[in-house]
Structures are given as C-alpha cells and as structure tokens.
Image (cartoon, rainbow, N blue to C red):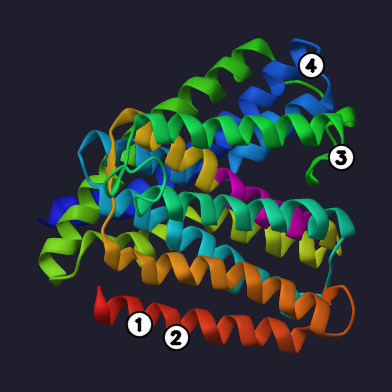
Amino acid sequence: MTVTYVLFVIGFVILILGANWLVNGSISLGLRANLSPLVIGLTVVAFGTSLPELVINVFASLKGSSDLAIGNVMGSNIMNIFLILGISSLIMPLYVERISIYRDIPVGLFATLFFGLIANGYFMGYSLTINRFDGIMLLALFGIYLWFTLKKGKPLEIDMDLEKQEPASWGKTLLLIFAGLAGLYFGGEWVSEGALEVAKVLGISETAVGLTIVAAATSLPELVTAIVAAMKNKIEIVMGNVLGSNIINILVVLGISAVINPLIYQPSLNVELGMVIAANLALVALIYLGKGLRLTRFEGALLIVIYIVFIGFSLQYN
C-alpha cells in the first residue's frame, strides 16, 4: 500500500518531466528535419502541455476506468479556466485577443457541448457510451479546427522563440525522446494505479479523484506556463495556452481515449459537464461585461473562489 502511494507521487513528477523531455527532444528533432517553427509550434509545443492528461487517459482507458478518464479531462478544463486564468490575472490583468473571442472560445464551448450530446446519447441514438466512432468524430473535429487555424486564422500563441533556437546534438536529442517516452510510460502507469487505490482507500469515486488530484497534477504544465508568461507580461500566451489546452483535452485526449476503449458515461457527470460549460460562458461574460476585453485582478480572484467551491463540492458529492 505504502509503495503504491510513493509511486503515485513519484509518478506525477516523472510524468511531467517526461512530457518536458519529449517536447524538447521533439523540437530538436523537428529543427534538425528543417520543419518550420509554425509547424513545430502547432504540433509538438501545443500538444506538450496536454501530454500528461493524454497519457493518464490512455492508461485509464486500457484499464476500463472511464470515470477517471472523463473526470481527468473535466477537472483539467475547469482548473484551466477558473484557477489558472484566475492566478494569472492576479499577477497581471489579462487582455484577450479578438481571435480568441471569435475562434478559440466558441470552439472550446462547441467541443464541450458536442461531447455532452454524444455522452448523453443524443447523437444517432447511442447509449450513454462514448464509443470508437464518437472518438473518431472528436478527432476529426480537431483536424478541422487545426486546418482552419493553419489556413484562415492566427495560430495559438506559443511561448518559444523557435526561429532562434538551435537543435541539440543527435545524441542528446535521442536521449531526450527516449527518456521522455519512458517517463510518460512509467509515470502514467504509476499515477493511474495510484489514483484507483486512493479512490478505494478514501472511499470516494474515481471521478472525484480525476476531477481533483489527477486533474490538478496533470494541469501543472499549463499552470507553470501561464504563471511564467504572466510574469514576463506575455499575456497573449496565457489565454492561448489555456484555450488551446481545453480544446485538445476534449477533442484529442477524450477522442483517443474512446478509440482505445469506449468510455462509459455516468449521468452524474453532467454536473461537472455543466461546470465546464459554465466556465466557458463565465469567461465570455467577464470579458464582455467587465472592463473591456480583459480579465482584471478582481475577476481573477472571483474565478479562484469559484474553483475552491467546486473542489469542495466535488469531494463531498462524488
């Protein structure tokens, strides 16, 4: 039992380190392959902060832990908007670019609503299961969004000056990639096993563990990126990072999870689903009803309070 808990904690550390190593190694490989910084940014870097969620969900799906997989994504998206944007706007008020309002926020809301319809059996008369076909549809929607971003709009902001970055040596590049893959594998395995054990010992559901402990840990890359960007006054990075991560979590992470193993959806999760929808709507309301196209420190504090209340509710009722 003690070993499981130790590995649970160590797993989070290795998981996040592994994601960072894999991203750095992949960037170096992309630069050596003469890929453009735009392509590298939209693929490797944009997916980097969502790698922990993806790996946890892959292991959860393989073990048939649908509640953990869905709870992880729901919790991460709620944390991204309420806590990460809240903390970032406390450091520095966040100005929101119009491209985020007209494209990324609506896409994030649409993706959440579409997932809700699928999960609740309103699409093609299916039961409360996100099956492989549903997963393929989610991935296809992300493909459309990515194509539209590349062809028609401004890409998500990436906090890396790839044009000036020099690739690492071949030895270091390969070492980073293999070390990253190993870290993601072992970290994901230990965290998923530990999460199930924690749920049993504490007498709470897998959903509650996914919504709180696992979601908080897997969202650490987004939190660190947002805080560093806010402190550097690169506020456009913060919003792009959060909105992009939320879109990837719904369309890619849940899509891949469902393709690996159909996810059984519990109707009780509609409370958390409603919270994700409310988070998106609250973001729009604060931006438009507040002081212009930005999030103030007061609004950031309000978002943090809402998140704390949500965590208390999740632990009590799940």
Q: Nearer the viewer, residue 209 or 17?
A: 209
Spatial CA distance of label 2 from label 1 is: 6 Å
Q: Which residues are magenta?
A: 237-248
Q: Which mark is residue 313?
A: 1
Q: Nearer the viewer, mark 4 or mark 3?
A: 3
Q: Which amino acid, mark 4?
A: Leu
Percent coordinates x, y for residue 206 in the rendering: 23, 59
Q: Residues within 10 Å of mark 3 (few under 14, many from 20)?
A: few
Q: Which amino acid, mark 2?
A: Val
Q: Nearer the viewer, mark 4 or mark 2?
A: 2
N-terminal-most mark, 1 or 4: 4
Judge from the rendering whether residue 166 lies leftward or rightward of residue 117; answer left or right: right
N-terminal-most mark, 2 or 3: 3
**Residue that badge 3 annotates:** 153
Label 2–label 3 contact, CB within 8 A: no
Label 1–label 4 contact, CB within 8 A: no
Residue 237 shows up from this direction: yes
Q: Nearer the viewer, mark 1 or mark 4?
A: 1
Percent coordinates x, y for residue 294 in the rendering: 84, 74
Q: Residue at x 33, y 43 (%)?
A: 125
Q: Is residue 216 above or below residue 258?
A: below
Disc 3 is placed on an element classified as loop
Residue 165 shows up from this direction: no
Q: Which amino acid, mark 1?
A: Phe
